Image (tube, rainbow, N blue to C red):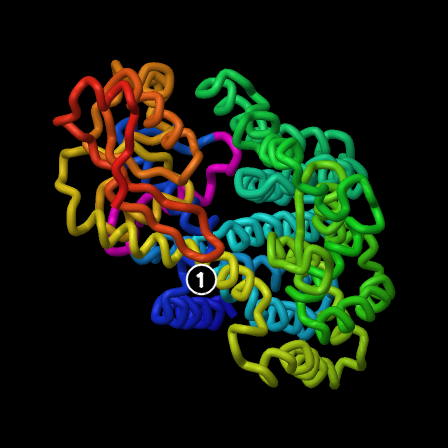
Amino acid sequence: MALAAALLSALAIWWNLRHGYLLYYGDAQAHLVNARRMVDSRTPGLDQLGTVWLPLPHLLMLPFVRVEEWWRTGLAGSIPSGACFVLATAFLYAAARRILDSRAGAAAAVLVFALNPNVLYLQSIPMTESFYFAGFFGLLYAMAWYARTGSVWAVLLAGAASNAASLTRYEGWFLIPFAALFFAFAGRRRLLMGVVFGGVASAAVLAWLAHNWWYYGDALAFYRGPYSAMAIYQRALDAGMEKYPGDHDWWKAWTQFRAAAGLCAGGALTVLGVAGIAAALWRRAFWAVAFLALPAGFYVWSIHSSGTPIFVPGLWPHSYYNTRYGLAALPLLVVCAGSLAAVVPARMRGVAAVLIAAVAAAPWVAYPRAESWICWKESQVNSEARRQWTAEAAAYLEANYRRGEGIYSSLGDLAGIYREARIPLKEVLQEGNNPQWDAVKQRPDLFLREGWAVAISGDDVSTTLVRSGRRGPRYVCVKMITVKGGPAIEIYRRDSETNENTLHQGAWRKE
């Protein structure tokens, strides 16, 4: 089973690499950058992890981003992601076999999970889904093991798997109290095992709180800091944006998530999974069904209360954003679909498992194009403008920038420019390079020394350059890139021959 999953993962990575899809997602690029700047930065180290995104995927990418070609193509993020996909399938099979007491049921669950094209796409790129699934299914297996044996080793494995999930996605934090209650009441030693699990599983949460406090002075910076989802959402509301659909509306929150989940799983698997809930309950897998439903509940709650949006093309505002969050329902659907094979007569279970996998995959086989994969489609639609202006800016810098001149720029979406232009990140003064970054923002006349600057029109870099032109070094806009649907990208070069009158006028020359 693991060998087949490894071959499938490698084939999917090769296919996406060949077609240039590995870094279509802006988040995929950003995850890769978070790992790279820990070793390629003016201030390398753990502070480059930032505050919002949890660190485990970036740490696992660390050995691979050192390889220049893997960093440039995105393969550095694909390798650990694919490895976690293989681990996730192994844990899923082991968990489903114990929960359903059926090899055929477990095989069916693994097949419908591993053959889902959205899962295969996301495991091929530097995203967090495969890392999370490995931790989640590891936790599920440990819980099933404990339910059968009461082994303390199962509790310790559960704690380790929970830490992996909690250092990857915040829904891992949400699962901890529910898993602790399970261990407290499912075994012979009850309360003691719940306390042991809770203590081990809390280590990841405490470590991230400590990281935020040590490097950024606020243990909750990931939740309420300037780069948090809540802060970004509030700034958008203050600028006049309408509320996200589902914001403090439980029905709309459920509707948005349900639509995304159906698109991620596919209609056939959704029907099989919903029908299979009854079969799973017939197999007395009550606790497993309840636990598997928790991630979906977390996202409905997040849409309602935490400023987390999910946009799908069929519902207002009829666009693509965070559709991949619908995969939170996939563990419930695949295990319950597998339970259908577990309730048929024993002699028919192998055939039933194959039929379940075939039916679940039928929509993807009938229309075998990436256009029908909602996660790929989201990445393709939302990256069209970014890919175009990134290529133009990278080509200009590759032709004109000389090593050692230095670039003043935020990273974020702009990081792709330096990756494609083969400019090391240590050449870039960026928002993670404190205290120098803050010093430049406050007094560019004293501290801004870079030969170049790259900005998104109106961002902090652009604003700082305007202030610098009034009192200090003047930067000339030598290239402006505008593409449909994208922001204006401004490339500046330091002007060393500006006279005093021009400095005070703050005039700007543009190509």
In the rendered view, tell whether residue 99 sits above or below residue 294.
Answer: below
Secondary structure that dominates the magenta span:
helix
Residue depicted at x 58% and y 57%? 91
The residue nearer to you, when weighing 247 against 236, is 236
Residue 464, percent from left and from top: 36, 25
Q: Quick check: is 242 in the magenta stretch?
A: no
Q: Quick check: is 63 in the magenta stretch?
A: yes
Residue 235, percent from left and from top: 60, 32
Query: Which residue carries the number 1 mark?
Result: 124
Report the magenta residues as a range: 51-72
The residue nearer to you, when weighing 49 against 426, is 426
The residue nearer to you, when weighing 303 against 327, is 303
Residue depicted at x 86% and y 66%? 278
The residue nearer to you, when weighing 126 against 9, is 126
Left/right of residue 221 with respect to residue 181 in the rendered view: left
In the rendered view, tell whether residue 92 sits above or below residue 310.
Answer: below
